[in-house]
Image: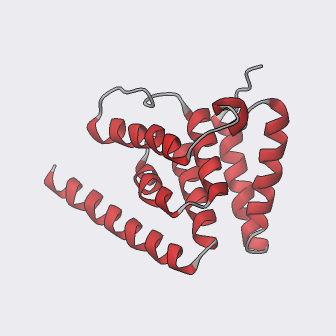
Amino acid sequence: MNLLVRPEAEFDLAEAYAWYESRRPGLGIEFLSSVDACLATCGLDPIHVFGPKMDVSDIHILLKSRADSNRRGKEGPMSGEVIDLCYVCLSTLSLAKDPESIPVIVPLLNDPSDTVRQWSGIALKAIGESDVTLQKKIDEMKKRQNLEQESGQVRK
């Protein structure tokens, strides 16, 4: 069974996440966990997409490919309309809370897709909430990414 989650629905989920987080820190993550459980029953979860054994490094390869396609402006296996796959990857990384995911996710904050940018932010927040040191690392990488983006715009 193929389940299509439209960008509008993904945007609504990101807005709902923000609303729940504003009510109580951590409540947004609980909300997304409930959504993930629901999607798992529909077939759009990591096990249905990747199989029972998936290594975080494999997900990193997929998302690095997306960021590389964005940076170079060239087509690649993760360029274009693969938003559902990006969502599953980012959702999986947010649950894994692996610090090695941070440098892979940060470049996606500049993705052309609103949905990918939103879910990248949500994944980083979930990872950062697991450890204060990780939150500092995320903040440093975001600043560096913003500086790189600003310097690239100045050169154009």
Percent x, y of residue 33? 78, 54
Q: Is residue 48 above or below residue 70?
A: above
Percent x, y of residue 19? 74, 63
Residue farthest to the top? Answer: 1
Q: Is residue 126 above or below residue 55?
A: below
Q: Is residue 129 above or below residue 35?
A: below
Q: Quadrant of the N terminus?
A: top right
Q: Is residue 67 visible?
A: yes
- Residue 73 placement: quadrant: top left
x 50%, y 40%: residue: 58
Question: 73 or 30: nearer the eye?
Answer: 30
Residue farthest to the front? Answer: 53
Q: Is residue 113 visible?
A: no
Q: Is residue 125 above or below residue 120?
A: below
| In the displayed structure image, the side of residue 68 where residue 152 appears, left or right | left
Percent x, y of residue 68? 33, 40
| In the displayed structure image, the side of residue 95 where residue 20 appears, left or right | right
x 64%, y 48%: residue: 92
Question: 100 or 117: nearer the eye?
Answer: 100
Residue farthest to the left? Answer: 155
x 75%, y 63%: residue: 28
| In the displayed structure image, the side of residue 30 where residue 131 appears, left or right | left
- Residue 142 placement: quadrant: bottom left
